[in-house]
Amino acid sequence: MTSRHVEITVISAENLQSNRKPFKKNSFVTVRTDAAVSTSKLYRTAETDCEGSGPRWNEKIEVELPAQARNLILEVQCKNGARTIGAASIPVSDFIGGWVPENYLHFLSYRLRDERGVRNGIINISVRMKVPEGLMSTYARKVTSGFATTSSQTKVGYPAVENSGVATGVPLNWNSYPRVQY
Amino acid sequence: MGGCFSDVKGGKQAVGGAHHQERPINRDADSNDAVELFNRSRGVFPLHTSLELSLSATNLLDRDIMSKSDPMVVVYVKKGHGKLEELGRTEVILNSLNPVWIEKITVSYQFEVVQPLIFHIYDVDTKYHNVNVKTLKLEDQEFLGEGSCVLSEIVTKQSRRLTLNLHNRSGRRGLRNFGTLTVHAEETMASKSVVEIKFHCSQLENKDLFSKSDPFLRVSRIVESGGSVPICKTEVVDNNLNPIWKPLSLSMQQFGSKDNPLVIECFDFNSNGNHVLIGKLQKSVADLERLYKERSGVNFVVPSSHGHEKVSKGQLFVDQFNEKQQFSFLDYISSGFELNFMVAVDFTGKQCVVFSKCLSFPMYLHDLILNFLTASNGNPQQHDSLHYIDPYGRLNSYQQAIMEVGEVIQFYDADKRFPAWGFGGRTAGGPVSHCFNLDGTATGFEVEGVQGIMTAYASALHNVSLSGPTLFGPVVNRAAEIAGNSLFHNNNKYYVLLIITDGILTDLQETTDALVRASDLPLSILVVGVGSADFKQMEILDADNGQRLSSSTGRVATRDIVQFVPMREVQSGRISAVQSLLEELPGQFLSYMRCRDIMPLTDRAAQSSAPQL
């Protein structure tokens, strides 16, 4: 199973609290996937000061995404790494598949939760899948006419890169999909 | 006591600059105060751009005996009741049947209103020459011809130039050739340059007794009379003598030129409004750029009581200095960007009749339940139903909303084919559908023009029985799918979904989830509430209070793409509620394009890299 590469720009966070007071210290963000593979790496941004409403890192990180990864885990850590101010789990399905082209630049925001599971602010990121050259418009879809209710369900995983010619699909996380479908 | 009741949080916000691309409301007396107040209370300021019209004509009628006509143009805009309001006049050009006028007419382009323009050309008699054109009485002049068009027609052309055939006052040309008039529209903005500057300070003086100063910066422009006019201010950073502020955007229109001196003052915020000056300095934008490049700081000066100034230890630094082009909504539209209109109509109604009758509820409970279940749509054949189609042609609320929004947006849609759906209804005895094609066919979901929507709606009322519950999720998903799919082909389409509903959502969370998923797509959603239901839920979706929508998976909306207006709130005003819906649209469009650095098409030719998505 090959890995994909994804470019994540950790932009900023807002409304962070620590001990019920606004969090104003230096912080950094770690990024990892939830794939239980020994090669799973931990990435981190540089530290940054807190601006008016929250820290702003604006740092681009290229993350290797193993095929089995279901989520990206982002954690905002305090300066010396002692505490996690807030963490967010980002389903890979939020930026893979869906209605847009593969290399779409997604701007996403997620709720952070602290170590006790209490909500603590929001983190803003942008994500773009790296697509190998020459495979860009493989998935151009026509807008489905027909009963408007049958939205295209064909969610595809990764393009068929391997020599075997078999498409390696990645089962996507359907939690975020509507229950009611017509 | 000032601190107890004033809007301290509001007072600490950043103000001004080029950040929001908003300008103060500058409407004429015709505008509706209630709508303005409604909008201002939501923090929405209309996007209106000042345009200059340059006029020229060819082959005008010759009215003068010895020489040629001396033409002048008077430009009118047609207001709501057919009344013509004069916008301006050109100068008189002597002796020409193919004049090119120099005097430009300023008109304020408002996206959300259809602005019909009327041009009257007159031959000015010799005895009126050298008289100020404004004082000329038009009845005394010879009428040469009339032309008319809608302002959006001009701006949606790439060249922003439209040629009209002139005719006489009754609209006919007869055997005569009245000639043509060419109108060219340009924005009056001096330059599209915007400078984004990020400041921080160090070692500021402490002005607060028990804590540290709460500093903010105010940037002002020096005017000729010697005083200064504030351009913008940063937000307040509490309790910090080394504050870092969010970046400020200044447009060249605001600071004039890069060498114009600006006054930058640093104040300590006090909730009673008496902010204490910590220090000030004078630098031009070019100086600030140099500070950024050299990574050096400049000291503030403090005017002391003796009259001369004291140099303080506090310093100002420029962390970021970005100069970029900020294109306006019109730049995108005239370069070929399109707005695509989609409609979804609420077909929910009494669906619990059988149920409650079976259980033999007492009549009053029966009515209570029906009222709860979006009963206001009722039976479309009856007068009190919101779906009632009046044989005399008076439009019902649904039709009104479709007409008003559709009329404005259709100019921006190239092929005039609009997806139209209904939701919450039962088609042909089948199950309840939450996203069915309004024209009743299985394959075509698009109709032609606003008239096509009206026809499909009327026929759907015969074929679809009102049902329920009220769910927006499927329609939003369908619209999002179309918007997302369009990105495979190009990225110059922006989609607008109009949802007309009479009632309360059955599943707020599902709708919220669908909206959060759609918030990163080129899509805006306008919701019009008709009838008298309590639309408090919709205000949550609107998110104008700053609370971003949160889905059940932990994802938060990237941007606010929903705008909601209840139709009844502005029932008798001359500006309808729907116009206030459309005012926010250009802003949402721009926020999508700008954060992805998508530029108007003509400018892309200069770039070598592929367009970003």
Image (cartoon, rainbow, N blue to C red):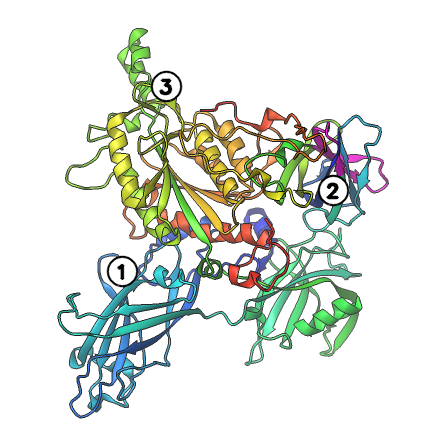
> Disc 3 vs disc 1: which is toward the camera?
3
Residue at the image point whose x is 45% and y is 50% from the top: B585
Q: Which mark is residue B513?
A: none
Q: Which residue is mark 2?
A: A23
Asked whether, in this view, residue B264 is left or right of residue B517, the answer is: right
The outermost residue toward the top is B359
Residue range highlighted in magenta: A64-89
Residue B301 is at least partly visible in this image: no
Q: Which residue is mark 1?
A: B79
Residue at the image point whose x is 52% and y is 38% from the top: A141
Q: What is the distance, in whole Å, between disc 3 and disc 1 at their CAs?
A: 47 Å
Q: Main secondary structure of the magenta part?
A: strand
Q: Position of residue B269 (x, y in %)?
A: 66, 57
Helix or strand or loop: what does disc 3 sit on?
A: loop
Residue at the image point whose x is 70% and y is 55% from the top: B214
Chain to which mark 3 belongs: B
The outermost residue toward the bottom is B66
> Disc 2 vs disc 1: which is toward the camera?
1
Residue A74 is at least partly visible in this image: yes
Helix or strand or loop: what does disc 1 sit on?
A: loop
Dot 1, crowdedness within 10 Å: few (<14), some or many (≥20)? Answer: some
Chain to which mark 1 belongs: B
Asked whether, in this view, residue B435 is left or right of residue B74, the answer is: right
Marks 3,2: beta carbons within 8 A: no
Q: Which mark is residue B431?
A: 3
Query: Are labels 3 and 2 on one chain?
Result: no
Label 3 or label 1, whichever comes before in sequence order = 1
* Tag 2: amino acid: Phe
